[in-house]
Amino acid sequence: MIENVVSPDHFRPVGSDALVRLRHTYKVYRVSDVGVVALAGVDLDVMPAEFLAVVGPSGAGKSTILNLVGGLDRASAGVVEVEGRDLGLLEDQALTEYRAERVGFVWQGTARNLVPYLSVRDNIRLPATVRRAQVATKHDVDGLLELVGLTDRAKHMPGMLSGGEQQRVAIAAALSNTPAILLADEPTAELDSESAARVLDAFRAINHEFNVTIIMVTHDLMAARRADRRIRVRDGRVLHEGVPVDPISEDGRVRLPDDAVAALGGVDLEAEVTPDEVRLRRRSETGHA
Ligand code: ADP
């Protein structure tokens, strides 16, 4: 492993109270003798209680960001700091404890989130029971079930639930350990739009109720829009950050963010629409950009 070469203090912005801080963060995977650059110098702050969506094409480095913040992997260089801890400086045992106590995970496939032979209630209790230090009380589990809208499913086995319901159980289970941060990797990828909306409702509810910080990787722009903020990652870099654009109105108009209006104001524009984004360009006098 390449040791961290950047001092966290050097990059700590004065007055910033971000919960998660990435500074010049690199991740290089060695495959045979070749280095695959997954992250190429990411700077990112996530504030306490923020709900952040990370979007971008496959292979961009989104999951790598989650793995580093979740302590599942270590950066090759740069800083990954959560709640003031520099994860790169933690011994393996301390990193394992950090992962168990401060982080909840919700993965895309429900198989990775839930134990199939335990009831919904026992699945939600499991993380705290494994930890033993603070076994979740009945009230906690009931409260979590209510928040994710599954009170009447407590005794069901996961296999008796729909994919969306299983994801909502996974969110409750990830929360039962009272983590500071919830990391979700494509949590709505396998769901129809109605189920996805209810899963996103559950994220919003626990975000609001527990002030838990959420970082959600998604391909789904509808899902990204439910977050407070989204960042786009491509080729291992954060391309831009911004608040979500409002939905299309009934007369087909889209309101641009104020910053974009200010930057573009008064010029004649044309738009190029792709499945991934809308590019705006100044229209040239000949009609071509
Ligand atoms: P995304 O989540 O945006 O699809 P990832 O973070 O999974 O992207 O991957 C970023 C890049 O790192 C890709 O080129 C991927 O092939 C590579 N990568 C990810 N994990 C590994 C690994 N364990 N070993 C080698 N290369 C990896």
Image (cartoon, rainbow, N blue to C red):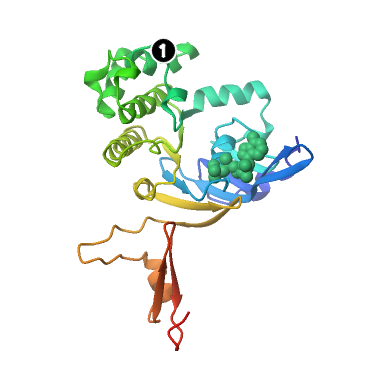
The percent position of residue 256, horizontal first and vertical second, equals 35, 66
Residue 84 seen by the camera = no
Q: Quadrant of residue 98?
A: top right
Residue 244 seen by the camera = yes
* 197 is higher (above) or lower (below) than 239: above
Please indicate whether residue 184 sits to the left or right of residue 7 in the image. Answer: left
Q: Looking at the image, which residue sits at the far right? A: 33
* 57 is higher (above) or lower (below) than 71: below
- Ligand 1 placement by image quarter: top right
The percent position of residue 74, horizontal first and vertical second, equals 65, 34
Pick the residue in front: 228 or 151.
Answer: 151
Q: Looking at the image, which residue sits at the far bottom? A: 285
* 232 is higher (above) or lower (below) than 198: below
Q: Quadrant of the N terminus?
A: top right
- Amino acid marked by disc 1: Val
Identified at 44% across, 23% down, the residue is: 111
Total of numbered circles in the picture?
1
The percent position of residue 112, horizontal first and vertical second, equals 47, 24
Residue matched to label 1: 135
Determine whether the residue tagged by mark 1 lies in a helix, strand or loop.
loop
Please indicate whether residue 76 sits to the left or right of residue 67 in the image. Answer: right
Please indicate whether residue 234 sits to the left or right of residue 218 in the image. Answer: right
Identified at 50% across, 53% down, the residue is: 232
